[in-house]
Image (cartoon, rainbow, N blue to C red):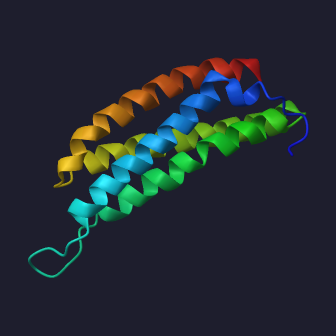
Amino acid sequence: MIPNISNNLYLSPIYRKAIEIFTLSRNISKYLVHDLAPLQSNGSEDSNIYFSGDIVQQSISLAPEIVKAESKTYFEEKHKHAVFLTQLTNVLYKNCDRLERSNSNGRDFLPLLRKELKKFRKLQRNWMLTL
């Protein structure tokens, strides 16, 4: 169990949104992989397949960073995790942009993920003020 963490954190809007983003990105990635996995006509693989895995890896890190920031006692430590969370969110958003340019039917779901990331950013700004 993590010290200094109340059960209210797991009910907080930012934590729930982070879990929602992870679930959404994992499902989108599963859908994209089927379209991007086959080799192209020249025998090479589609480079966008790596971005589909990246969105899952980045989104799975959102919730633990929130927990780490909340569990720290000093502002500097909290701020370090909050800044990393901002960087993760920005990279995740950029990878969504890259995947939207891919040749896949699943790219139609990426605007939904970007919309949820925008909501997450708003929650994140408010949350950072409360640290």
74 horizontally vs 92: left or right? right
Coordinates of residue 50 in the picture (x, y in percent): 37, 64
Q: How many marks?
A: 0
81 horizontally vs 4: left or right? left
Coordinates of residue 27 in the picture (x, y in percent): 39, 48
The residue drawn where x is 56% and y is 38% is 19
The residue drawn where x is 42% and y is 41% is 24
Q: Quadrant of the C terminus?
A: top right
Coordinates of residue 6 in the picture (x, y in percent): 84, 29
As rendered, which of 118 and 25 lies closer to the eye?
Answer: 25
Q: Is residue 62 above or below residue 40?
A: above
As rendered, which of 97 and 28 lies closer to the eye?
Answer: 28
The answer to whether one can see residue 125 in this image is: yes
Q: Is residue 40 above or below residue 13?
A: below
The residue drawn where x is 51% and y is 35% is 20
Coordinates of residue 73 in the picture (x, y in percent): 90, 34
Q: Is residue 45 above or below residue 87?
A: below
The answer to whether one can see residue 95 in this image is: no
Residue extending furthest toward the left:
41
